[in-house]
Amino acid sequence: MTQKLHNDLSLNALFNEAKSQNVDVPDRLMSAILADADGMQRTPIAPVVRSSWWYDLINQFGGRQAVAAFASFAVFGMYIGYAAPSQVLTGFGAISGEIALNEAGFSGATEFELSLLGE
Amino acid sequence: MPFDDSDMHDDALMTLYANGDNTAASVLASRHTSRVLALAFRMLNDAAEAEDVAQEAMMRLWKIAPEWRRGEAKVSTWLYKVASNLCLDRLRKTRNTALDDIPEPEDDAPSVEEAMLQQARAASLQEALDALPARQRLAVTLRHIEELSNPEIASVMEISVEAVESLVSRGKRALSAMLVGQKAKIGFGT
């Protein structure tokens, strides 16, 4: 017990001496730490930029909405080009034309299709 | 904006730094670097490595500044935690270092007797600390040299207070056992 107490006192004396020893921070270390701090502050937070050619191209034409409008008009133009004049005149001719044929007594199948069925 | 840094809380300094105030970084660095450096040196017994650890720990502090939440943690405890982990990582990588590789204290330097004894005591303590398992060394250093409380050490090491007490107790017993044979050499002989 006495020996343990003596050991503890010796150890505590060593710890106290260690505590009293000041650690000097070298100037070069402090300079490096402050340079790091400065560098971290100056690092800009880069905004997320979409830089793909696809987005660039869309932007050239006025953005997504403008391109969507162009595409709609293009599809509608192709429809006008392919559809028969009567269908164009009736608006959505495919539907009204089919109704007109049904009313006239046609089943909607062509002669070629009927021949394939053996009729 | 100039401010009186003497009483400013670390949390406030962190906010100022995050908002672009360089002076806050200077105050924080001068407050905490020496502690971190001292701990790293106790753990690694290598000045260059200790400086690397101190710089890395402070770098991480600058990085975390924009997300720092007031009152959640003390800057000093947070830094001790980061520095401890960095030291333990380095020790894991150099675990094969034999105790015999640690240089003996220089005892032939021209000096007065007491200074020589003090130097020998410091070297003996460091040598004994180096011989402890890393986590015991960390716990003893934080408790008896850096003077942290057991709950603070538990927070730094992410273990329970009971585990801290156990580590410190075992560490001190091992240190006593190692130093008992050197009592005459370090001036504690009876």
Image (cartoon, grey):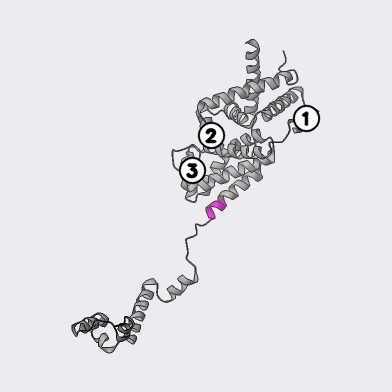
Question: Residue sitting at 29 percent across and 88 percent down?
Answer: A84
Earlier-in-chain disc, 1 versus 3 = 3
Q: Secondary structure at mark 3?
A: helix
Residue at numbered disc 3: B13
Question: Residue sitting at 66 percent across and 45 percent down?
Answer: A28
Earlier-in-chain disc, 2 versus 3 = 3
Q: Secondary structure at mark 2?
A: helix
Label 2 – label 1 distance at C-alpha: 34 Å
Rate crowding at label 3 as few (under 14), some (14 to 19) or many (20 or more) other CA atoms within 10 Å. many
Rate crowding at label 2 as few (under 14), some (14 to 19) or many (20 or more) other CA atoms within 10 Å. many
Amino acid type, label 1:
Glu
Task: Give B73 or B21, whichever is nearer the viewer.
Answer: B73
Residue A105 drawn above or below residue B116: below
Q: Residue furthest left?
A: A103
Quarter of the image holding residue B46?
A: top right
Q: Marks 2 and 1: which is nearer the front?
A: 2
Residue at numbered disc 2: B156
Q: Answer yes or no: do the residues labelled 2 and 3 have beta carbons within 8 Å?
A: no
Is B56 situated left or right of A49 in this image? right
Q: Residue furthest front?
A: A118
Task: Give me the chain letter of mark 3.
Answer: B
Rate crowding at label 1 as few (under 14), some (14 to 19) or many (20 or more) other CA atoms within 10 Å. few
Q: Which mark is residue B106?
A: 1
Label 1 – label 3 distance at C-alpha: 42 Å
Q: Is residue B31 visible?
A: no
